[in-house]
Amino acid sequence: MKVVRLYRHGGVENLKLEEDRIPAPKENEVLVRIRACSMNRLDIWTRVGYPGVNIPLPIILGSDIAGSVEDMGSEVRNFSKGDKVLLYPALVCNRCEYCIAGEHSMCDDLRILGHLVDGGYREYIAVPEDILYKIDSSRSFEEASCLPVTGTTAWRAIFTKASPKPGDVAFVWGAGSGTGIMLIQLLKNLGCKVISTAGSEEKEKRAYSLGCDLVINYKKENVVTRVQEFTNGKGVDVVIDSVGSSTFETSIKICKKGGKLVFFGATSGDLVSYGVRIAYRRQITLLGSYLGSKSEFARMLKLFNEGKLKPVIDSIFKLDEVQKAHQRMEQNLHFGKIVIIP
Ligand SMILES: [Zn+2]
């Protein structure tokens, strides 16, 4: 089978296309023929490497995997050959206190596919049955592959952490990111008013087409001023920030009294600074979030299977064009998900 491996951290030239043997599934494992694997910002971080995380090299990137069941071990009960499946994007121990409580994204041995264990930039993968979920036959592999990381992250941020009410105003940084699109759809389904940001006129238009009530061009406009205008000076009920350094202080400033700030990413950097006085005087709640549990994944997937969640695909690349796919994401040219197909 074809596989793309990363042997050392750095530029896209380190992503190497190779031939390898198709893995044999163990007793509790299913061999999945990968039909689509979407990219996340995590793919870039894993390729480049960052302090504090010991990524085992060589590694196969790719966390978001959709495919069909090809073969299985003797203990597998719930799947048969040909089933369309989507993978929960991490291996978990199923034994620690967090797994037992159903909080899989807090697992003591959480290993996100394509980050701490081999992922989906290849033709076949063997994985334990417990991370497989069925995709409705009417849905495409490409669309399904957009969901695991972004859909699960968005679901937890909204339903488990922020829990907004219909009519609340929510602010989402980056309408064009995979997670941004999922957040906007889920918030609109709930009946919230949604403000988001975009960095070009083209992306602004596309953000409005997702249902946003206000899109702010963060390169040209002052975000705090625009939010204050839209909310009659009150600020928003919920802010969702996955950007980190460059946005966190603004996220605090646009929160209303008693508002909530949910954060789960640091695409612009890890260190933030903000005035604590405004944060405590307004009694803002800060809520860290990270991925989501298997049950959150399953509930999100149910919405997709019912046609109520519609991922946006930016572009599709073949496995041997993976370097181009990385460049497109790194240059921020995309709106929606970049999908890789073997
Ligand atoms: Zn665990």
Image (cartoon, rainbow, N blue to C red):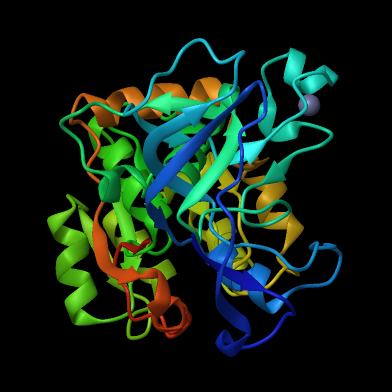
Viewer-proximal residue, 246 or 177? 177
Q: In which quarter of the image is the C terminus?
A: bottom left
In this rendering, position of residue 296 left or right of residue 310: right
In this view, the residue in front, 114 or 287, is 114
Image quadrant assignment for residue 44:
bottom right
Residue 233 seen in render: no
- The answer to whether residue 262 is visible is yes
Residue 90 falls left or right of residue 171: right
Whether residue 251 sits left or right of residue 224 in the image: it is: right
From what the image shows, is residue 111 above or below residue 50?
above
The percent coordinates of residue 185 (x first, y second) are 27, 42
Q: Where is residue 251 in the image (x, y as percent from the top left)?
A: 54, 59
Query: Does 299 sit above or below residue 219?
Result: above
Q: How many labels does the image show?
A: 0
Ligand 1 resides in the quarter of the picture at: top right
Above or below for 75 versus 176? above
Which image quadrant is residue 267 in?
Answer: bottom right
Q: Residue furthest front?
A: 21
Say which residue appears at 22% left-offset and 53% top-offset: 212
Q: Indicate whether 63 appears above or below 208.
A: above
Seen at 61% across and 50% down, the residue is: 264
Residue at 43 percent across and 68 percent down: it is: 224
Left-right relation of 195 to 76: left
Please provide percent x and percent y for residue 219. Answer: 37, 84
**At which x and y percent is residue 205?**
14, 69
